[in-house]
């Protein structure tokens, strides 16, 4: 007897679509078609001569909607799998794109940069470790290492120190005054590095004696009866004056983070210390400082990362001249002024190696705090 199909059930050759394999193949087919359509639209938008505002609007709408469609359809694919595979693959559905982007824009360029560091200036002939010899023995790089060490110690130390001092003192003032002071100190964070460098370049500006001094520092010096000085030419003081710009920018960041940690300390703990006879200095060193030590280390390592990669301030104010060269600026000079791509790549790898331990420590601290909150 011939079986009569139920209403809505595929008949004949299309019955296989109801099986697990059929549903999986269909689910794979739909995201593939969607991705191909998105890619073709991208090519169309890239080559179109339509007005830019139309192109931008379509790209935003289509890009956001297309990505949402891809995630939705890819999730449909995983939903067709057994529970065991569904549990394993679902996290990768959402983490996978980020991993691909990181691999494409971070891991692969790092490998290519390392390979380029083993080649000559034009990237044609293999020269081995010759570029690394330059990176560790040339006068420019030795000067850069010395200056980066000054930025690291003085810049980080004073930024964290001033941030801690202001956070502790502001915490003991009236709330309105505390808000005003914190807003004032944090305000430089809203300025770009280049903008802050231009501001301070005017502060250090020099005119010959007898001429009108437009630089704030020399204007004050001459008003007090002194002689104007070319501050940015005075070694090694010019490097210290550049570090002042970093401290001015980063103190607000350190203050905000440390202040939040201080306010998280239970008031009962502080009152217990005062009842036991401890003065404010003892409370600071024996209660507040140990409690927020993790936060201080996190802030310090973050600023250390920033100072190791310092570039904008030096490039804007002095261009690395007059004994102010740093590693990142020397790498820029080798790549885009001397056009020695091998040396530039080698210096970039050296800078990466210097940054990795600090990044590892930051991630380790973050993992430990995450475990503590669980």
Image (cartoon, helix red, strand yellow):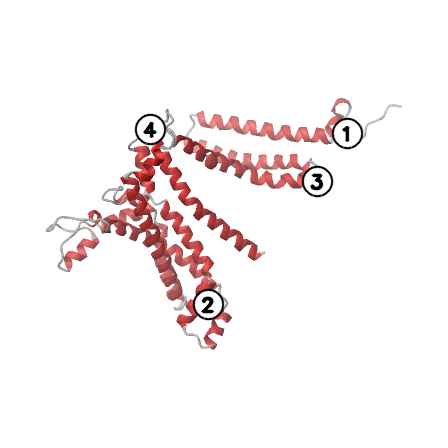
* In the rendered image, the vertical position of residue 120 relative to residue 160, given as above or below: above
User: How far apart in space, not on screen, are marks 2 and 4 (Cα)?
Assistant: 56 Å
Residue 279 shown left or right of residue 269 in the figure: left
Residue furthest left as drawn: 210
Q: Nearer the viewer, mark 3 or mark 1?
A: 3
Q: Can you identify the residue that label 4 sits on? A: 121
What mark, if any, has residue 83 been given in the picture?
A: 3
- Can residue 180 be seen here? no
Q: Quadrant of the C terminus?
A: bottom right
What mark, if any, has residue 175 been given in the picture?
A: none
Decide: marks 3, 2 in contact (CB < 8 A)? no
User: How far apart in space, not on screen, are marks 3 and 4 (Cα)?
Assistant: 55 Å
Residue 107 shown left or right of residue 248 in the figure: right
User: How far apart in space, not on screen, are marks 3 and 2 (Cα)?
Assistant: 51 Å
Does label 3 or label 4 sit earlier along the sequence? 3
Q: Nearer the viewer, mark 3 or mark 4?
A: 4
């Amino acid at each position: 007897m011939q079986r009569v199909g139920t209403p809505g059930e595929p008949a004949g050759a299309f019955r296989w679509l109801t099986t697990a394999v059929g549903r999986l193949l269909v689910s794979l087919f739909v995201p593939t078609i969607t991705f191909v359509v998105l890619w073709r639209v991208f090519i169309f938008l890239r080559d179109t001569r339509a007005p830019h505002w139309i192109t931008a609007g379509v790209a935003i709408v289509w890009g956001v909607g297309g990505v949402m469609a891809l995630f939705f359809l890819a999730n449909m694919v995983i939903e067709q799998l057994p529970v065991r595979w569904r549990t394993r693959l679902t996290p990768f559905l959402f983490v996978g794109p980020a991993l691909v982007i990181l691999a494409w824009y971070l891991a692969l360029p790092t490998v290519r940069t390392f390979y380029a560091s083993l080649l000559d200036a034009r990237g044609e002939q293999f020269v081995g470790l010759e570029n690394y010899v330059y990176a560790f023995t040339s006068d420019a790089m030795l000067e850069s290492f010395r200056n980066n060490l000054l930025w690291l110690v003085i810049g980080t130390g004073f930024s964290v120190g001033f941030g801690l001092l202001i956070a502790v003192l502001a915490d003991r003032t009236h709330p309105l005054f505390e808000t005003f002071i914190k807003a004032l100190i944090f305000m430089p964070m809203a300025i770009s590095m280049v903008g802050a460098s231009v501001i301070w370049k005017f502060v250090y500006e020099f005119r010959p004696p007898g001429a009108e001094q437009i630089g704030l520092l020399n204007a004050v010096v001459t008003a007090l009866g002194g002689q104007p000085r070319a501050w940015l030419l005075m070694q090694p003081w010019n490097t210290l004056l550049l570090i002042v710009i970093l401290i001015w920018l980063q103190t607000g960041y350190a203050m905000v983070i440390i202040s939040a940690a201080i306010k998280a300390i239970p008031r009962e703990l502080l009152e217990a210390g005062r009842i036991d006879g401890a003065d404010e200095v003892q409370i600071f060193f024996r209660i507040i400082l140990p409690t927020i030590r993790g936060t201080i280390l996190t802030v310090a390592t973050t600023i250390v990362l920033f100072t190791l990669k310092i570039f904008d301030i030096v490039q804007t104010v002095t261009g690395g001249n007059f004994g102010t060269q740093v590693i990142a600026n020397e790498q820029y000079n080798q790549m885009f002024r001397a056009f020695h791509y091998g040396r530039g790549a080698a210096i970039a790898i050296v800078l990466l190696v210097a940054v990795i331990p600090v990044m590892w420590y930051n991630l380790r601290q973050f993992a430990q705090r995450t475990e503590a909150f669980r």
